[in-house]
Structure formats: C-alpha cells, structure tokens
Image: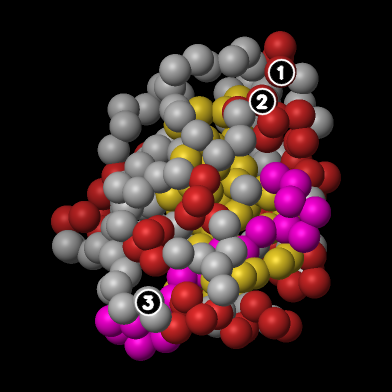
Amino acid sequence: MCGRITQHRDQLAYAREMGWQADDFGRQEGRRAPSWNVAPGTSPWLMHRFEDDREHMDTVSWGYRPSWAAEKKIPIAINARIEKAATGPYFRPLWKKGRAIVPADGWYEWTGEKGRKQPWYIRRKDDRPMFLAAITGYRADKEPGENTGFVIVTAAADGGLIDVHDRRPVVFSPEDAALWMDNSLPSEQAEHLARAMALPPEAFDWYRVSTDVNRVGNNSAHLIEPIAAQDADEATEDEDE
C-alpha cells in the first residue's frame, strides 16, 4: 500500500473540505479529469503551501527518486514508510520541507493469491474526501522529473484494515492535514502528528469491488461499486497494481 487511489470529485470539493477559499488559488480548468483509478506514474492533484505559504493545488507526478538513487538504479518509490521516512537519507529532505497532501475519495487494496487477486475499495464511512499525507520534491520553479514527484506516507495497518493489507496510508482530518502542510512545523512534530493523528480503522468502510480496476486503463464509477462475495469468488483475472 498504497498503489491506487481515486480522485473523482471536482478540485473545488477538496479545497472546500479543507476549508480553503476557492478564489485564493483559482480553478484550473481542463488540466485533469475525474478518475476512479489513479495509478503511480500519473499526475493527480497535490495540495501544498510551498509558494509564499499560500494554498495551492497542482497536478504532480506520483513517484519519486532522488538523482543519486537514479544513478544507482534504485527503483522509483511510490510510498514512504513512516518508520524510515523521517530519518532515512532517501526521504529525509522531503520530510523536512516537502510535506504535502493528496486529496482522495478512497484507495484500493488487493488480497488473495496471484492469479486470483481480489480488489477492495476503502473509503470514509461518511464518504467525505480524505487527505493522505505525502512528501514531495515538487516546487513550481523546478523542472518536472523523478526528483520532483511525490510519495504517499504509510503506516502499519491496525484493526480490521489488517484484513485487506498490512500497510495503510496516513489519512488526516482537514485540521491535521493543514498542520501537516505548515512549513514551520518541525520534523519531529510532523512525525508525531503522522503517528498519533491518522484517522483510525473505525473511520473507514472497505468492501470487494470488480477486478475491472486491475486494468489501469479502466476508469468509471462502477469500479468503486461493491460486489457480492459470490461474484468475488469467481474472479480469476490477475492484477497489474
């Protein structure tokens, strides 16, 4: 986790849920269509306060690799484990000055054996937008590249979420998401925030969905509709997470 998310709401819905005034950053028409199947390597919305500490939402590539890691042929990362992200050399600079938020409506996980993987969809019980902790090298004045993408911060799953995966994204309330994006927040306090204030398992629902989501090119609302257990048992298509 986390290898697939949804961002099917309008950009302004995420801004309003965060408490942002839409007129402060403007609506960016035509840059990104709603998606029920957002995969690494694509460019979903990323919320941040990097320029003049003002509110911004830009499309940023999902995936990060610093230049030195590219030279060593280290694969591009899409997630950052909280256990290492704050202190390890790969992510430490981003943790200190690159904290951002990925707005989302939910995320997918897979269970089962290869060849019979069953996708699950996880969303808030109240179906409100969620805010995933992220770190990034993105800045408006930088040329796009592997070292300007973002990764989603993950933690060990607990409660019933363990049933679908042993990792989960760190999901914040709007208030804690705003604090996470505060550039003046020290790294140590940001780590405590991510460990202590992530929404608990009881805030979420999770259910089986169609294996159509396995194919990245599929993108429609039916991907997040629940399916019966009997239908899930008949799934044989392999996933391409």
Q: Amino acid at mark 2?
A: Leu
- Nearest the viewer among 167 and 148 is 167
Whether the residues at callouts 1 and 2 have beta carbons within 8 Å, the answer is yes
* Mark 1 surroundings: few (<14), some (14-19) or many (≥20) residues within 10 A: some
Compared with residue 116, is residue 15 higher up or lower down, i.e. above or below? above
Decide whether residue 112 is among the magenta residues: yes
Q: CA distance from mark 3 to mark 1?
A: 43 Å
* Residue 141 in sight in this render: yes
Q: Which residues are magenta?
A: 111-129
Disc number lying in front (2 or 3)? 3
Compared with residue 138, is residue 158 higher up or lower down, i.e. above or below? below
Percent x, y of residue 129: 70, 45
Q: Amino acid at mark 1?
A: Ala
Residue 235: give its label.
3
Percent x, y of residue 39: 38, 51
Q: Total number of numbered labels?
A: 3
Compared with residue 210, is residue 29 higher up or lower down, i.e. above or below? above
Q: Secondary structure at mark 3?
A: loop
Q: Secondary structure at mark 1?
A: helix
Percent x, y of residue 46: 54, 37
- When asked about the image quadrant of residue 53, the answer is top right
Percent x, y of residue 238: 28, 73
- Residue in view at x 21 percent, y 55 percent: 70
Residue 39: give its label.
none
Q: Amino acid at mark 3?
A: Ala
Decide whether residue 163 is among the magenta residues: no
Label 1: which residue?
Answer: 22
Label 2: which residue?
Answer: 12
* Mark 2 surroundings: few (<14), some (14-19) or many (≥20) residues within 10 A: some
